[in-house]
Amino acid sequence: MSLYGWVILLSFAGPFLLSFDKKVAFFKEWRFVLLAALTIAVPFLIWDEFFTQWKVWGFNPDYLLKIYFGHLPLEEVLFFVVIPYNFIFILKVVQAYFPRRNQRRFAPYFAFAFIASSTIWLVLYSENLYTFTASLLSCLLTILLRNKKWYADFVWAYLVCLLPFFIVNGVLTGATTPEPIVWYSEAHIIGWRMISIPFEDLYYNYSLLLPLTWVYFSLKNHKENANSVLKN
């Protein structure tokens, strides 16, 4: 097993085992989660492939199984299934265990902060490919989806997931290893690091998880509405 493979496996193990918790019963959501993850994975893997070819980022073969799909290692492909699974699990835990959470007041300020900060990075760092694309996508997605009923729950889940985000991305970017598993070209990032994690990763992960949540709830609501029609 490669180090990147261990990171993926261990990050998946906890949410998977806890998926059978009676209060959350996350195993009942698997079909929606998997379909949503695969839907979002396609454009992000295409983005990933191009940026890998252009050397915006890359992967250290010393930490890989050396099984590739195009220029992407198997572990990177699995990342786009495991991380979405874990995030929707966190969101469902938030909904199940914190029913009295503040669902409305904080979310608009959070959305404004993402839109405003993304716009600033777009203006100041337009020549940095990673900064520009992550900022642009997070800005546009927030404008499009900030008024959805589930957006407030998404915000709380995103904040909770920052802890595992820092652990997983820290390992991937070299916080615990002599060389990073995933490296980034300094020409395409601002250069601010959260220990070893590029600042842009906050916006990249937000841009991955927000449309994931949109697709997940769209699929689930469509199914529930269809069942309601059949019962009537």
Image (cartoon, rainbow, N blue to C red):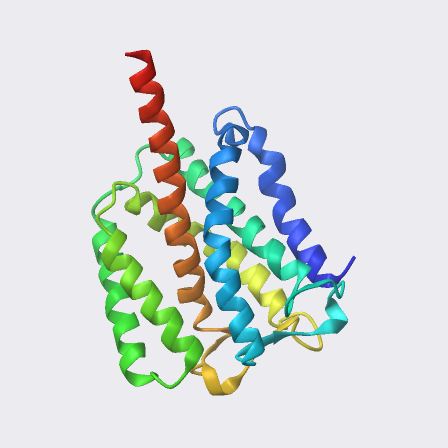
Tell which of 46 and 204 is nearer to you. Answer: 46
Tell which of 53 and 129 is nearer to you. Answer: 53
Where is residue 172 shown, x and y percent of the image?
62, 67
Left or right placement of residue 162 versus residue 217 in this view: right
Name of the residue lying farthest toward the top? 232
Figure check: 100 above or below 61: above
Where is residue 61 shown, x and y percent of the image?
73, 72
* Camera sees residue 136: yes
Q: Quadrant of residue 98?
A: top left
Q: How many marks?
A: 0
Figure check: 69 above or below 13: below
Q: Residue at x 58, y 49 (%)?
A: 82
Where the C terminus falls, by quadrant? Answer: top left
Where is residue 77 shown, x and y percent of the image?
61, 58
Q: Residue at x 59, y 60 (%)?
A: 168
Q: Residue at x 62, y 42 (%)?
A: 14
Left or right placement of residue 34 versus residue 7 in this view: left
Tell which of 56 and 27 is nearer to you. Answer: 56
* Camera sees residue 196: no
Left or right placement of residue 116 versus residue 192 in this view: left
Figure check: 189 above or below 59: below
Where is residue 64 shown, x and y percent of the image?
73, 66
Where the N terminus falls, by quadrant? Answer: bottom right
Q: Residue at x 29, y 18 (%)?
A: 229
